[in-house]
Amino acid sequence: MTLGDVWLGEAIEKELIDPLDIAEIENWQTLPSRWKNLVKRDRQGNLQENGLIWGAPYRWGTTLIAYRSDKLDWQPQDWSDLWDERLSDRISMVNQPREIIGLTLKQLGKSYNTENLEEVPELKSELLNLNKRVKYYSDQHYLQPLVVGDVWVSVGWSNEIIPLMAKSPNIKAVVPTSGTAIWSDIWVKPKAKETETELSEIAKQWLNFCWQPQAARLMSLFADAASPVINTIDKDELEPDITNNPLLFIDSAIFDKCDFLEPLSKQSKEQYINLWKEVRNS
């Protein structure tokens, strides 16, 4: 079964999945540490360096800035560009507090995973200024206004923006230079009976396959997402359609500044939700 990484903590806490015995999966060792650490959790779903392994990341993407190149005579490069007066009432965004508050934190030089928002006093005013420029918030329909030209910039997920670019040559996209949010799809093991705790041989073979170079190349070419092992493959062995695509083969200096949306404490979650309500109701 596949699961988005932002749901992994909840699935663990609610005992919906079992940890994986990864010892017999040879290609686990090829996975970069950043991806291994993402799935090492305690039984409450929190990140733990020596925790159990609760999943197998197999593809990933980012939050991008998409824009209409035929409407703008300049190219957005970073989150700070969203505050440009020229984009007033010309932006659509996903309706996700962690994403919008997170990109604002990033614009202020902070992490998406800032625990105590009260330590960033300028955050609320920056969010209010950004909110004035946003015409639509929607998880399902944020790209439609961009297609018809009702907005000129959209903020959303790479697996939805990349295929749209193939159909619409006037739509371009960038990974913000100060870093962005990373998401990952993960293979997980649904909760099983006590007598069925071991992974099947087919499951082990499948996980090994997903981390093989050939599978990684195919994933990155045809799935509108990248494989977590793509950067472990010699660049000369990768197709130009991968290495020449900065949305998939991300510059390492930018990638190092990107964040997974990590689990937050209950108190921090309430801060994010309350701040989002204040901004949206302003």
Image (cartoon, grey):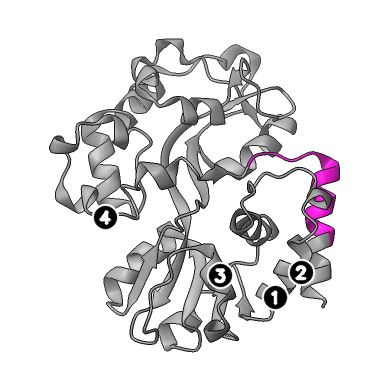
Q: State the residue at coordinates (67%, 44%).
A: 113
Residue 276 percent coordinates (x, y) = 77, 64
Who is closer to the viewer here, 161 or 177? 177
Q: Are the residues flagged by discs 2 and 3 in contact, CB closer than 8 Å?
A: no
Tag nearer the camera, 2 or 4: 2
Contact between labelled residues 3 and 4, with CB atoms less than 8 Å apart: no
Q: Is residue 235 left or right of residue 54?
A: left
Quote the CA–CA distance across marks 1 and 2: 6 Å
Mark 1 highlights which residue?
A: 129
Question: Which of the two discs, 2 and 3, labels the residue nearer the N terminus?
Answer: 2
- Mark 4 or mark 3, whichever is nearer to me: 4
Callout 3, which amino acid? Gln
Which residue corresponds to mark 3?
Answer: 140
Q: Which residue is mark 2?
A: 125
Tag 1 or tag 3, which sits nearer the N-term?
1
Picture residue at 82% right of the left edge, 76% below the top? 281
The amino acid on which the numbered mark 2 sits, given as a three-letter code, is Ser
Instruction: Tell me the residue that label 4 is attached to.
Output: 245
Inter-mark Cα distance, 4 to 1: 32 Å
Q: Distance between the Cα atoms at labels 4 and 3?
A: 25 Å
Q: Is residue 94 above or below residue 210?
A: below
The span picked out in magenta is 262-274
